[in-house]
Image (cartoon, rainbow, N blue to C red):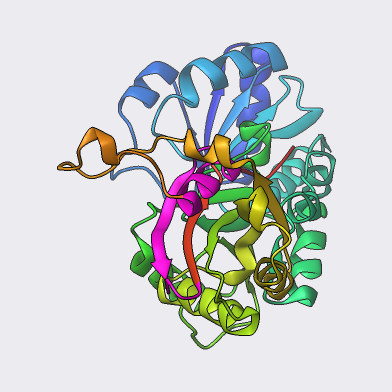
Amino acid sequence: MYLYCYARSDKARHTGQKLLTEAEGEWIEDLEAFVSSGDSGSRRADGTIVLILHQEPCIKLLLERLYPSNIKFPIINVTPDGKYAGILRTGGYNTYQILDKITAALGCIALSGEEDRKDTAPDLMQAVLSYQMKADDEELLKTIAAYIRDGGSVDVYSDLPLEMSEPILDSLSYKTYLFQSNQKNELGQAYASANQEDKYSIFITCGKIPEVEKNGKVLILVPRIVVVGLEVSSRSDPEYSAKLCREELDKHGINPDSVVTVAVSALARESEVVTTIAKDLGCFVTFFDSRLLKAVRIPLNKGFSNERMDAEFCTAAACLASDNGRILMRKTGDRNSIIMTTAIKRSPVYLTH
């Protein structure tokens, strides 16, 4: 480790000098100049900033000067009398080991420990239950959930909008990497790369992820947030329709486990075809009055005249059930069986509540 120590009073400088006799490092004479110079090539990669100040000025410097800068070093606070030391910001995997060395050098009490993360760690299982997420490995899900509860940090990859109730605190446990909805290949590449690393990762998606050799530490979670709008032909065969529905989902790269409801008109809700499809997908049925469906207007491609702006029932049902969410596929299937439109619910997936 290499320490960049900053102090103001003689007492604090005495504490810092004692620390620098035990560890390699240097003094920061002007913190503003240190910050404004950025992460230059002359800085040690194993550097740690040590603020030998009381808590109030440390917090002010952290919020107003160090956080807005591009300096990514761990930041540790040591009281001027050298009696206490604690972590203000972690950086890398070994911040707590650096703190241990500082407390050993000064003979002071550590105010931070790796177990502290338990007090702010979110509960992954809460999000899993809220969105009825399907895990590709239930045992790995339990392992990762326990790891997060114990203060561990995991990488989270998704092509869905993710939200956290307290982003500043929750980002200590979840480091998110978000992809656009049209970046399926990039998400698949990230999945392949994650399976080559020795750390826990979570992929949250409603799409299909390509099969790769797994390392046993990468979890796939599929939230139930996709709506299937259906129009049913009077000649439909229930078993064939259920098979066709799955085939269409698969063809468009949609995981059937992500379907939360089948949306139909009130007249079709008792259809054996609808109940068979819902049972096959493990979801429930939502129905709407035909007058409400007829009133739905959705944007169409340029070139359509105004009189053709009425939505077909399957698309109207999907739009209503998803709160006008993004359409994934529109009006596909077989006119002699089922016509379907799928949409994804508008609201983001909340990792923490």
Q: Nearer the viewer, residue 96 or 278?
A: 278
Query: Residue 195: x percent and y percent?
Result: 52, 78
For the record, the magenta segment spans 313-337
Residue 106 belongs to the span the image colors magenta: no
Residue located at (33% from left, 32% from top): 38
Q: Is residue 208 visible?
A: no
Residue located at (67% from left, 71% from top): 281
Q: Nearer the viewer, residue 158 or 167?
A: 158
Above/below status of 209 relative to 164? below
Residue located at (40% from left, 60% from top): 331
Left or right: 8 with respect to 279? left
Left or right: 178 with respect to 345? left
Most extreme residue toward the left is 303
Residue located at (77% from left, 45% from top): 122
Above/below status of 345 relative to 260? above
For the C terminus, which image quadrant? top right
Query: Residue 207: x percent and y percent?
Result: 49, 66
Q: Nearer the viewer, residue 5 or 62?
A: 62
